[in-house]
Image: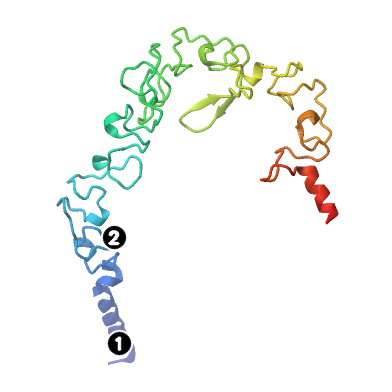
Amino acid sequence: MSTLRLLCLLLSAILALACSNKDFDGDYDYDTVVNGEDNCSTSSNPNQSDRDHDGLGDVCDMCPDLNRRPQRDWDNDEIGDDCDDDMDGDGVVNAHDNCAMSPNPSQIDQDEDGFGDHCEEDPDNDGFKNNFIAGTEDYYIEKFDNCRFAFNPSQQDTDFDGLGDACDNCPETATEMIEYDWRNKHLDQIDQDHDGIGDACNDSDGDTVLDATDNCPIQFNPDQADLDKDKVGDVCDNCASVPNRSQWKTENDYQNACDRIANSTQQ
């Protein structure tokens, strides 16, 4: 027998031995139970305990005491929905949650019909459905409510910015559309002084410059002077000679950009 033939036979024998070894590729979790017979093939469980007899071992069963297949886990907390007393993980148990499959810790129910605004098609009862219903795939519908949580059957939108007058803090000034995520689109309704009038149409400090573009929106500065060009007006800039848009200070809240420069030159 040739040397080459002997080598081939020897190699075949080695491969056959390796392939017959369960720990090599037939037992992914190395629990001595081959994958085809393992009720948790990716989690080690040599005793194969299965209390609910559903075919899934306890160590990989999200409801080990409840016979349920398939295993769903809406809030990804590794507790199956069938045995999770808070399926959406919002801190409100299912029995008292008015949107059991949509996180809504506030439990707001504007029309008091028992269904939370977060998962109701028309929470303000004005006859117009919201453009997105949490917990479903219903995103595109023929007509949608331009004020999801404010009763406005007329859907009046004076400034044509897509937000109804009933919930627009600048109803006569079109505001910019900002997309925060694929599910919800919100208009820029920033109101820094919390007076109910949006910055886009408000002049909080009465300096004739609207808050949206005012470099000191709550301090009178009609000239908008900005010596360091950091977009923070001199009258409200904690260091008007050094650019520091963030107006950051140390945790002791006394050292600003000017102080840091002064200290560094003294060292």
> What is the secondary structure assignment of the residue under circle 1?
helix
Label 1 near label 2: C-beta < 8 Å? Answer: no
Mark 1 neighbour density, 10 Å: few (under 14) some (14–19) many (20 or more): few
Residue at (81% x, 36% y) in the render: 240
Where is mark 1, residue-wise?
5
Residue 40 in the figure: left or right of residue 137: left
Percent position of residue 241, x then y? 83, 38
Give the quadrant of residue 223: top right
Tell me the mark number nearer the camera, choosing from 2 and 1.
2
> What is the secondary structure assignment of the residue under circle 2?
loop
Percent position of residue 33, x then y? 21, 66
Give the quadrant of residue 37: bottom left
Residue at (79% x, 45% y) in the render: 259
Residue 196 or 55: which is nearer the viewer?
196
Question: Considering only order in the chain, which callout, 1 or 2, is on the residue closer to the N terminus?
Answer: 1
The structure's colour scheme is: rainbow
Task: List the single residue furthest toward the left.
Answer: 53
Structural distance between the alpha carbons of marks 2 and 1 = 42 Å
Mark 2 neighbour density, 10 Å: few (under 14) some (14–19) many (20 or more): some
Where is mark 2, residue-wise?
43
Residue type at mark 2?
Answer: Ser
Residue 253 in the figure: left or right of residue 100: right
Residue 201 or 255: which is nearer the viewer?
255
Q: Is residue 220 above or below residue 46?
A: above
Q: Is residue 77 above or below residue 30?
A: above
User: Which quarter shows the C terminus?
Assistant: bottom right
Percent position of residue 86, x then y? 31, 37
Residue 143 circle label: none
Residue type at mark 1?
Answer: Arg
Percent position of residue 192, x then y? 63, 25
Q: Is residue 31 above or below residue 94?
A: below
User: Which quarter shows the N terminus?
Assistant: bottom left
